[in-house]
């Protein structure tokens, strides 16, 4: 069974950089796509981006200028960096497996990230 | 960007009833349409992929249908644990390649 465990800072000031990491258990990250998805409190889901089988990343155009997703195959982890955080970036951030087949089938537990001065 | 519009925003039903949730796409998404269930404080859970295929472990009371731009999720004989928020999600060719609907909240009457 695939399990994802994520961690990172939960409270940031405006202009700071968000860094989150997701560890994958039960599967090699080299064999699948891995994504970050976020959800503002009480709102819907937004795909942030993915790292693919080759280790290349693809991003949501709305965040592309500020986001970097990478993977570390030696640690079986992948990471998210989002620069220049503002209050509008306050959300629960999830890591997820996918979408190799177009869907996100395993999810991390989620991390609430709050941006406040 | 392909926009997914879910309706209604909220539904109130009783256990044992049958419900149909709607998801309409702003342009055709072929068969790349999935449904997720999210309960408070939890991550979304994949229910249905490619319109009508149930994910592993999903009960048969959940079924999906549709094509092109109009899709539905039907839950037969609602169980107490089915009251949650449901999201549809599409996979497309244009960025962003993955978008979600705004969700339908299924509440207990």
Image (cartoon, coloured by chain):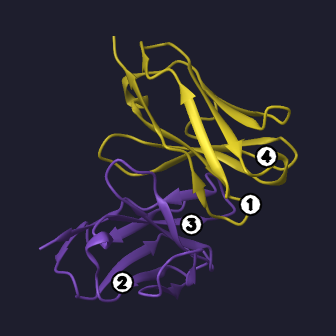
Chain colours: A yellow, B purple
Location of mark 2 (residue): B75
The chain letter under disc 3 is: B
* Distance between mark 2 and mark 1 Cα atoms: 27 Å
Residue at far left of view? B109
Q: Is residue A60 visible?
A: no
Quarter the C terminus of chain A occupies: top left
Whichever of callouts 2 and 3 sits on the residue coming sooner in the sequence is 2
- x and y, in percent, of residue A70 in the image: 75, 33
Whichever of callouts 1 and 4 sits on the residue coming sooner in the sequence is 4
Is A28 on the left or on the right of B36, as rendered? right
Location of mark 1 (residue): A100
> Which residue is depicted at the point 22% across and 88% down?
B17
- x and y, in percent, of residue A14 in the image: 42, 14
* Distance between mark 1 and mark 4 Cα atoms: 12 Å
Q: Do residues under tags 2 and 1 come within 8 Å of each other at their CB atoms?
A: no
**Dot 4 crowding, Cα within 10 Å, few <14, some 14–19, many 20+:** many
Q: Do residues under tags 2 and 3 come within 8 Å of each other at their CB atoms?
A: no
Of badges 1 and 3, the one in the foreground is: 1
Quarter the N terminus of chain A occupies: bottom right
Q: Secondary structure at mark 2?
A: strand
* Distance between mark 1 and mark 3 Cα atoms: 13 Å
> Which residue is depicted at the point 56% across and 29% down?
A7
Does mark 2 fall on the same chain as mark 4?
no
A47, A7: nearer the viewer: A7
The chain letter under disc 1 is: A
């Amino acid at each position: 069974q695939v399990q994802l465990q994520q961690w990172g800072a939960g409270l940031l000031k405006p202009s700071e950089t968000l860094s989150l990491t997701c560890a994958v258990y039960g599967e090699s990250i080299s064999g699948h796509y891995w994504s970050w998805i976020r959800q503002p409190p009480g709102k819907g889901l937004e795909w942030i981006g993915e790292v693919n089988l080759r280790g290349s990343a693809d991003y949501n155009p709305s965040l592309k200028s500020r986001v970097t997703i990478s993977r570390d195959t030696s640690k079986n982890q992948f990471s998210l960096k989002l620069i220049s955080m503002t209050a509008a970036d306050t959300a629960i951030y999830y890591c997820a497996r996918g979408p190799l087949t177009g869907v996100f089938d395993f999810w991390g537990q989620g991390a609430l990230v709050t941006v406040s001065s | 960007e392909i926009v997914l519009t879910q309706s209604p925003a909220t539904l109130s039903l009783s256990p044992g009833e049958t419900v149909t949730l709607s998801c309409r796409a702003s342009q055709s998404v072929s068969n790349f349409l999935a449904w997720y269930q999210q309960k408070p404080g939890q991550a979304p859970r994949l229910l249905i992929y490619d319109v009508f295929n149930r994910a592993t472990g999903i009960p048969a009371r959940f079924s999906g249908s549709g094509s092109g731009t109009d899709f539905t999720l039907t839950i037969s004989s609602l169980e107490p644990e089915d009251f949650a928020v449901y999201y549809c999600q599409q996979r497309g060719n244009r960025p962003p390649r993955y978008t979600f609907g705004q969700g339908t909240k299924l509440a207990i009457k």
